[in-house]
Amino acid sequence: MKFERQRYVLVQYKFFNIKNSSIKIDEKKIIRAIWNTLTNLFGECSAYKCGLWIVDHNVDYKYFIIRCSNVTKYYLITSLVFIKKLDTLPIIFHTIKTTGTIKKIKKLLKIYLLKWNSEGKFKCKG
Amino acid sequence: MIQLKLNYTNTNVIIDNLSIEDILNKIELYKWIGYQNLFISFNYDNINKARNIISMIKSKISLNIYGKIQIFTDNLKDLKIKLKNIQEYRDFAISLATKDINSLLFAANDSRIDIISVCNREFLKEITPGVISLVKQQAKTKFIEFSLISALEEDYYNRAQIFRELGIFLKWAIKNENILIYGGSERDPALIRGPKEIIYSIYTIFNIPLNKCKRIFRENSKLLIDKIINRNENSYFTNELKFINKIKNEI
């Protein structure tokens, strides 16, 4: 059986228009929301090729690393665009970087964490 | 390896009826999500404070901010009246949003109008291949602005209908990709999406080549920015027109 190549996408998210900025959300809810929009937009026939898996999730810095197949990277990012709410909370996803190996993305993540720390996490509310 | 910083532009940032704090929060959000150039849209009726607002934002946020005057009109006569005084706002991009086909045809030929806006679904329905063809004749100086906002606002079958309308429009327009630019026109800040995400969604949904999608966000908007910057210089010429400053205290 031939291996399929995989991609790791670093995604940041931000809740919008909420007073309690320290709200934390479970990664299961995120992956369920992605699956829902993926099947709505592209159908089950395309969605089964994705093979989504959240590798890492940080609720403090509000980022996660998601693994998907090489071919369906664009499907994943498109479905992130069309997610408007998680648990009735308005949410914005922002894809930062895509790599081919987990080692590379974790290396990059360290750089981004230093950058976010220096910026004071996020300037915007949420 | 040196990585060049990519410039992404959103040509329709709506700040109607927002307080100064909300405006700044919204612009910060655009910065966070990856835009470097923003065109802030002002209605033709309240453009008095436009320059003050732009300078205030520029002083607080390090982004390239430009102004845009959005003209809404129902008939050609009204459009001509509004365009009479538009020369005073040479540092602004001038855009037109209308359902009237005569106004659209007039705007496609008139050099004072830089952008024809079809961001909303109601305006998208009215644009014809004839208008697109006229704009193509002036490619790189005149642009058509579109948006995914109406698809983002709707769900399920309504969204599919909008995709179809957008798909037909893009099929006509993409033959000459130099005329397209992206204007987000997000009234609700929660619907703001990043440029890279929009590029990938246009690529996957409408099957438009990736290099053409990227061109919409980078090169075309750069052409528009260059045009506006050059226009403010006294020595600016177009093919047939020359802008002449008013001579004050002549008499």
Image (cartoon, coloured by chain):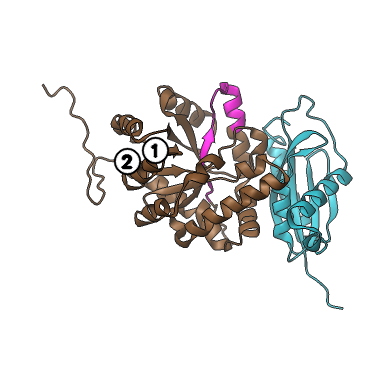
Chain colours: A cyan, B brown
Q: Which mark is residue B112?
A: 2
Taking depth in this image into account, of B169 and B92 the one nearest to the observer is B169
- Quarter of the image for residue B72 reads top left
Residues under labels 2 and 1: Cα distance? 7 Å
Which callout, 2 or 1, points at the residue further toward the start of the chain? Answer: 1
Please determine whether, in this image, residue B75 is positioned above or below residue B210: above
Q: Residue furthest left?
A: B251
Residue under the image location 47 percent in, 52 percent down: B180
Q: Which mark is residue B64?
A: none
Tags 2 and 1 touching, CB below 8 Å: yes
- Quarter of the image for residue A90 reads top right
Was residue B10 drawn as part of the magenta stretch in this picture?
yes
Q: Chain of mark 2?
A: B
- Quarter of the image for residue B115 reads top left
x then y, percent, for residue B87 = 29, 33
x then y, percent, for residue A122 = 70, 35
Q: Amino acid at mark 1?
A: Ile
x then y, percent, for residue B112 = 32, 40
Image position of A28 (left or right of B161): right
Task: Report the number of discs.
Answer: 2
* Quadrant including the C terminus of chain A: top right
Image position of B7 (left or right of A40): left
Q: Which mark is residue B94?
A: 1
**Bounds of the magenta segment:** B7-26
x then y, percent, for residue B9 = 52, 45
